[in-house]
Amino acid sequence: MKIWLDGGLRDADAARVSVLDHGLTVGDGIFETVKTVEGRTFALTRHLARLARSARGLGLPEPDLDEVRRACAAVLEANPLPLGRLRITYTGGLSPLGSDRGDRGATLVVALGEAQRRPDSTAVVTVPWTRNERGALSGLKTTSYAENVVALARARERGASEALFPNTVGRLCEGTGSNVFVVLDGEIHTPPVASGCLAGITRELAVEWTGAKETDLPMDVLDRADEVFLTSTLRDVQGVHRVDGRELPGAPGPVTAKAMRAFDERAADDLDP
């Protein structure tokens, strides 16, 4: 397996990042996960625009997006896969042991892993921990993912593949690595970015392609929604057949199934929408 590290391809087993890299010591980094199909990226332009936004939000120097594109192309050429998870990681680089950044420049890593198509539906749980919609990292895709690790472990313990968070005012926010949509009386709704959720690329496309409404939603909407579905880079659009102890028989329901078809058709027509 070949990865890109700071300017060139390396054997994954031999690639080295300093143990003093700020991404490791304090989680000072950002990332993007991009779906690849037969060696071609999906929605790369949107992902790179968000990478740049996250860098600005975190105060990192803006990445050279031309270099990132070259890195992605090189990694994909070196590692042919039918369906892949392309991970772009960009950190504060070699720094002192503390929150202050060093002056040695950022670290860029691009790596590829094999992926499998997700099932059409899944189970989710809600968790008691909150997203801080007013926090410094709100809306940024950073490498500070420990909260997600803990919440996803809780979900796995309960036979689910995702955990859903409220925000600090008790509104529905997002999953550990997904956005959430609900169907009410035939209409699709999803929490607004102001809720503290990540502005997901698949979420953005699903809103554009299905006409979903951005709506401030209470957590108990999950107890009464006709249908629930998730979106993410590798899930695309995925139905939910159980929320905590509530079963949603027949998932994916008709509105979700229509959204899934619309997404698949539009994505197949344009790999960089």
Image: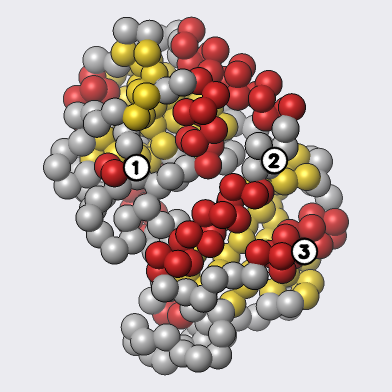
Dot label at residue 229: none
Q: Amino acid at mark 1?
A: Val
Residue type beneath disc 2: Asp
Residue 144 x/y as whole percent: 39, 64
Rendered location of residue 202, percent (x, y)? 53, 37
What residue lies at 55% left-to-right and 90% top-to-bottom?
104
Which residue corresponds to mark 2? 272
User: Which one is nearer the viewer's eye here, 68 or 160?
Assistant: 68
Q: Is 119 above or below relative to 71? A: above
Q: Give the CA distance from mark 1 to mark 3.
A: 31 Å
Helix, strand or loop under label 2: loop
Which quadrant does the C terminus fall into? top right
Q: Would residue 143 be seen by someone viewing this image from the given angle?
A: no
Work out whether 106 lies above or below 210.
below
Q: Residues within 10 Å of mark 2 (few under 14, many from 20)?
A: some
Q: Quadrant of residue 83?
A: top right
Q: Answer whether residue 99 is visible to the viewer in this image.
A: yes
Q: Nearer the viewer, residue 2 or 196?
A: 196
Q: Residue 193 shows which numbered tag?
A: 1
Instruction: Give the residue at x 72% y 60%.
Output: 69
| Pointer 3 or 2: first along the chain | 3
Which numbered disc flags the more N-terminal residue, 2 or 1? Answer: 1
Q: Secondary structure at mark 3?
A: helix
Question: Horizontally, is 41 left or right of 188 in the view?
Answer: right
Can you say whether 157 is above or below 181 in the image? below
The disc label shown at residue 70, or none: 3
| Mark 1 / mark 3, whichever is N-terminal | 3
- Amino acid tagged 3: Arg
Q: At 60% from the left edge and 80% from the top edge, which residue is drawn?
A: 17
Q: Secondary structure at mark 1?
A: helix
Q: x%, y% of residue 238?
A: 51, 26
